[in-house]
Image: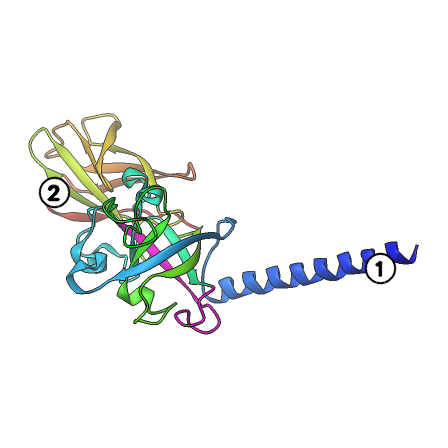
Amino acid sequence: MGLVLHHARLFFFFFVVFVFCWILAAAAAAAAGISTTGEEWRSATATYSKGAQSPTIAGGACGYGDLEKSGYGKSSAGLSSALFERGSACGACFELRCVDHILWCLQGSPSVVVTAADFCAPNYGLPGDYGGWCNYPREHFEMSEAAFVQIARRKADIIPVQFRRVNCDRYGGMRFTVTGGSYFYQVLIANVGSDGEVIAVKVKGSRTGWIPMARNWGQNWQCSADLRGQPLSFEVTASSGRTVTSYNVASSNWSFGQTFEGKQFLN
């Protein structure tokens, strides 16, 4: 009987410790303004790009161009193929923290939220544990320098990290940049809140119904339609299944190359 009571007390003690740690982690995330999605932490690795190779400067494989103008700031990352999902992960937000490396990780393992803005290409000429960091099926983040130094020392080479998907905190509405030609219409969708990941888009002119668009590359969506001279509306569906419709975001005199602001997903 005494042994059973002892085990029961141990179980209760560890349960209380677990709940306490969970509450502390949730409070820390809330204090940092991070809205979590309930995902568990997963293990990966991370490096960072310097100068002109930074996704913040180069624009990356998602098509955002200048990330400051697109609403994504300097905290961005390129994802290995296992995470990039052929571009569907573009715009998604990940919380990262450096772990298990006393030399490189900053004290207290602070976290940073990055936006998926680029593709980290594999290098199968090198082994996955020595230079081929982005080789499939490795989960790896090629971070901007500005994001990397918030969790690790700048002189670090490659660091072990934990990551999880979180909601994206954006300012203002979604941004639609229209390009194309007479019967080829393309729109780049940026500054997407909530889960940040767009899985379906429709466009509507004043003389058309809703036209489904196909992903061209990254977050560029296209259709074969002549929409010139018509006000434009957009219907955007996120990976959560939620849909936001922005009516008449562009007036009838819009032109290719312009950017328009619509509604936003709310966390």
Q: Residue 113 at x, y = what percent?
A: 38, 59
Percent from the top left, x then y, of residue 237?
35, 37
| Of labels 2 and 1, the one closer to you | 1
Q: Position of residue 195 (x, y in %)?
A: 40, 47
CA separation, marks 2 and 1? 74 Å
Q: Magenta residues?
A: 100-118
Crowd around label 2: few <14 · some 14–19 · many ≥20 (10 Å)? some
Q: Nearer the viewer, residue 48 or 131?
A: 131
Residue 177 relative to residue 247: left or right? left
**Residue located at (18% from left, 53% from top):** 59
Amino acid at dot 2:
Trp
Task: Answer yes or no: is residue 31 visible.
Answer: yes
Tell me which numbered mark, 2 or 1, is placed earlier along the sequence.
1
Labelled disc at residue 119: none
| 10 Å crowding of disc 1: few (<14), some (14-19), many (20+) | few
Q: Which mark is residue 254?
A: 2
Mark 2, secondary structure of its residue: loop
Asked which quadrant contains residue 239, the reply is top left
Check the image and tell me how it is coloured: rainbow
Residue at left offset 9%, top offset 28%: 183
Mark 1, residue position: 6
User: Is 106 in the magenta?
Assistant: yes
58 and 109: which one is in front? 109
Quadrant containing the N terminus in the rendered view: bottom right
Q: Hey, what amino acid is under mark 1?
A: His
Q: Is label 2 in contact with label 1 (beta carbons under 8 Å)?
A: no
